[in-house]
Amino acid sequence: MASAFSTSHKYSQLPKRAGSTARKSGDSKADPNHGYRQRALGSTSDPRVTPQTRIRYFGSEPFPDSCREGTRRLRKRGKRFCTGQFKAVHSTSEHIEIVGLDPLTTLFNRRYMEESLERELHRARRNHSSVAVVMLDVDHFKRFNDTYGHRAADKMLCLLSRCLQATVRSDDIVCRYGGEEFVLILPSSKLDETMMRTRQLQEGIRQLRLETGVIQAGNVSVSAGIAIFPVHGEDSETLLSIADRALYDAKRAGRDRMAVGRPAVQIE
């Protein structure tokens, strides 16, 4: 027993390993991700985390309940990030996912679109108003990609995205649905107004030019499918499905066209 006690006592007198105390206190030198986790959680236990630090990473305040105001702030925040005003502490893809943007075009991504459409439909039901869903698809995109290459195709998508952002209203939501497909959510937009705005958008896209000369005016066109709440459907899944079928009808009619969806058939 004496030997065991003396051994324990001997080791208890040895100096503690460097960093052991730091791990207990949460020092960032022991845990390089400690500071980031504290900022992400909004904790103020780390004295170095100041209000300015939190503003730099996550903004001065959370998004409001208003979807439209939140959309404007999210678009502004995504623009700040894409111009390099956010300090990178993790990979770019993780930051892009946080702000709900598509990495290539910096438009809102599909997940944000689905959430926003649900909110706009809820508001429209409450206010007895309408919501328009416009699905766009770039005509002959595969042929363009095969002819000019992936880099030119990516530039074309970015150019098209900027055109969409410059054309819509501040309350509208523009998203990249996937590949060369885009979705526009137009709150309080009736069918006649939506058709007129879609024609204007298609005309503007025909005038696009790329500085390198690869894209000339008339080289790019889009087909469009339109669905209106509550005329064509009353939930997001139905509206997107009807807009997609209308888009397919526009493609079959010759491309660079617009088609309006047909109301869903109720099967009893």
Image (tube, helix red, strand yellow):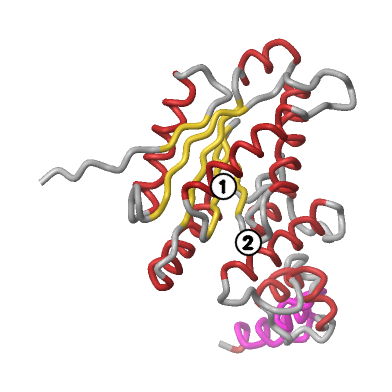
Q: What amino acid type should be assigned to the residue bearing mark 1?
A: Leu
Magenta span: 3-27
Give neighbour class at mark 1: few <14, some 14-19, many 20+ (Cα, 10 Å).
many
Q: Is residue 23 magenta?
A: yes
Q: Is residue 101 above or below residue 253?
A: below
Q: Amino acid at mark 2?
A: Asp
Q: Earlier in the sequence, mark 1 or mark 2?
A: 2
How many numbered dots are placed on residues in this image? 2
Q: Is residue 6 magenta?
A: yes
Quadrant in which residue 102 is drawn: top right
- From the top left corner, tell me how far across and down residue 205 is, in percent: 71, 32
Q: Residue at x 75, y 14 (%)?
A: 148
Outermost residue on the top side: it is 147
- For mark 1, give the secondary structure: strand
Seen at 71% across and 40% down, the residue is 161
Structural distance between the alpha carbons of marks 1 and 2: 11 Å
Report which residue position mark 2 lands on.
171
Q: Name which quarter of the figure residue 122 lies in.
A: bottom left
| Image point (78%, 76%), residue name | 54
Determine which residue is flagged by label 1.
Answer: 184
**Quick one: 254 or 112, which is closer to the camera?**
254
Which element is circle 2 on?
A: loop
